[in-house]
Image: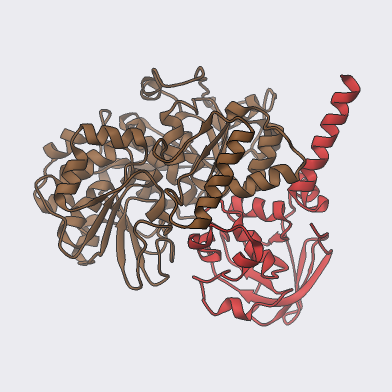
Chain colours: A red, B brown
Amino acid sequence: MTAIPRTVRGRVWVVGDHVDTDVIIPARYLTTSDPQELARHVFEDLDPSLRERIWPGDIVVAGVNFGSGSSREHAPIALKAAGIACVVARSFARIFYRNAVNVGLPVLQCPEPIPVQSGQTVSIDLEAGTVLDEAGGRTFVAERMPDVMREILEAGGLVPYVARRLQEREASARATG
Amino acid sequence: MAMTLVEKLLADHSGRREVRAGEIVHARVDMILANDVTAPISIQEFYRMGARRVFNREAVAMVPSHFAPSPTIQAAANIQAMRQFAREQDLPYFFEIGRMGIEHVLLPEEGLVVPGDVVIGADSHTCTNGALGCFATGMGSTDIAAAMALGETWLRVPETLRVVYYGRRKPWVTAKDLVLHTIGRIGVAGALYQALEYTGEAVRDISMEGRFTMANMAIEAGAKTGIFEVDEVTLAWEEGRARRPPRIFRGDPGARYAGEVEIDVSRVEPQVAFPHLPENTRPVSEAAALGVRIDQAFVGSCTNGRIEDLRLAARVLRGRRVHQDVRMIVIPASQRVYRQAMAEGLLDCFVEAGAAVSTPTCGPCLGAHMGVLARGERAISTSNRNFVGRMGHRESEIYLASPAVVAASAVMGRIASPEELGLTEKDFLEVAGEAA
């Protein structure tokens, strides 16, 4: 998994409240887990033309409860594969939030609404957890992620994080065994 | 320090004397589940983590239920991957098609999850198991892979929102109506990051099956889990079923809650959730007055595919016919439910009324197969979600209701209450759950 950059600057797509996993990636495509295949259908039931307009490095700015519904990890996988660099939302559904971190898709929870429009640009400092609305000139501060999640993100996702823990376990078993 | 029911469960499973909402704990897990949509990624990530064996072969259940029996070659390949993993790891709980059920119905029914467990599953409706006094929550595939390797998972201890039910239900008001009403009250993000604890004198009157329905939909309010305290109804249901001894946890008096919502159930009517959110609820009388015509009626899913649900739908359909413009689909949620329904003559009643009956599958609920909607079509369904495109075309619509309201609507060809068909309180009590 590629390391996550510290800063992201990109064009924004604004979506509303309660954007659920069924519109992020409809269940009819869930027989595949191929990221590129999933990316082709991202947001299809929200706005069928949106996928063609998303470019790598774009940022999603959402309202409350982003990613509600299913536990399908295909949702953050599809967003990441479509090139979405970060999702900023007023709140996230908890399974989606956790999945995003696990697969290495940066997510920021900013409770205050960010008054940007689709097409405008924001600059995000993932380390500091801030979002600068370039047109409005205001900076918004995200809620701090729990330490365990930061460690997972820094490790490059849950797979390398657990791989390390398993190695530690084996090493200590050898030492004591 | 006084702890909530959920804090007690998580303290126990993380080897702590006490934990407080907001803390992160590493909790031991008693049961892990995955289905044919989520398991393929879990299996792949499990091996990518460098893991070789699951931590406990008896604590991992694999249930092919979503795209099963397979409608496509790719779906078949996913189930094949699960089957192969189950063999490699020598898992006793892989449930083959024809011997399976929808995971959240099957596992409690088989006694594989028992009161006091921490259960995690790669499916958002894993919270269903909270009906048994478990801490049960959905996660993604990679989290499940990690738990299969480590035998534990990290969890933020949630605050608890208590919903207190009191009063006596009116006829034709089911557990589904209570949970829809609750979501209508608090909203689809009303319990975000929190545990929903269903309590109060009126929950004692709710059968185990009804409790599963209510816990199932906790996620539809954003909750991490939906939970009931274990009582005599739970223990009676577990009798002869639980494969491990149940453990009973109770919240302490004086524990700190995030809030309390009181619901007088005597004032709740059967509910219908309008498109496209489960919180868009209205009383059935109001919905019926709008004359909403329907194309498809579905009774099934992990929410309402249990035997009591089928009894209720059959009672409404008995001696009646599904409207000529409606196709009705009935799917028992497990093989055991299927056989029971057969023995009781319910399947006969459905087929006689002109409904299609299928082997257990999640198919229609998520627009996978067996009942996908075309553009402009409307369905009334006993499932849990009415999101845009959930059951098919993005310009189709889903209305959520109880099995009784779905069956009555199937007969009328529009959203309707059982009372419109002349059904009475006596008819309802004939089939309502023992505890109702």
Residue at image x 18%, y 48%?
B351
Front in this rendered view, residue B397 or A90: B397
Residue A5, given in percent of the width and then of the height, sits at 83, 64
- As drawn, B22 above or below B10: below
Front in this rendered view, residue B359 or B22: B359
Q: Is residue B280 left or right of residue B95?
A: left
Q: Quadrant of the N terminus of chain B?
A: top right
Residue A93, given in percent of the width and then of the height, sits at 58, 54
Residue A10 can be seen, yes or no:
yes
Front in this rendered view, residue B181 or B101: B101
Residue at image x 34%, y 37%?
B210
Residue B54, given in percent of the width and then of the height, sits at 67, 32
Residue B161, given in percent of the width and then of the height, sits at 51, 41
Q: Residue furthest right?
A: A175
- As drawn, A23 above or below B149: below
Residue B189 can be seen, yes or no:
no
Residue at image x 57%, y 62%?
A64
Write down the quadrant of residue B148 in the picture: top right
- As drawn, B197 above or below B240: below
Front in this rendered view, residue B344 or B208: B344
Q: Is residue B32 left or right of residue B301?
A: right
Q: Is residue A77 left or right of residue B162?
A: right
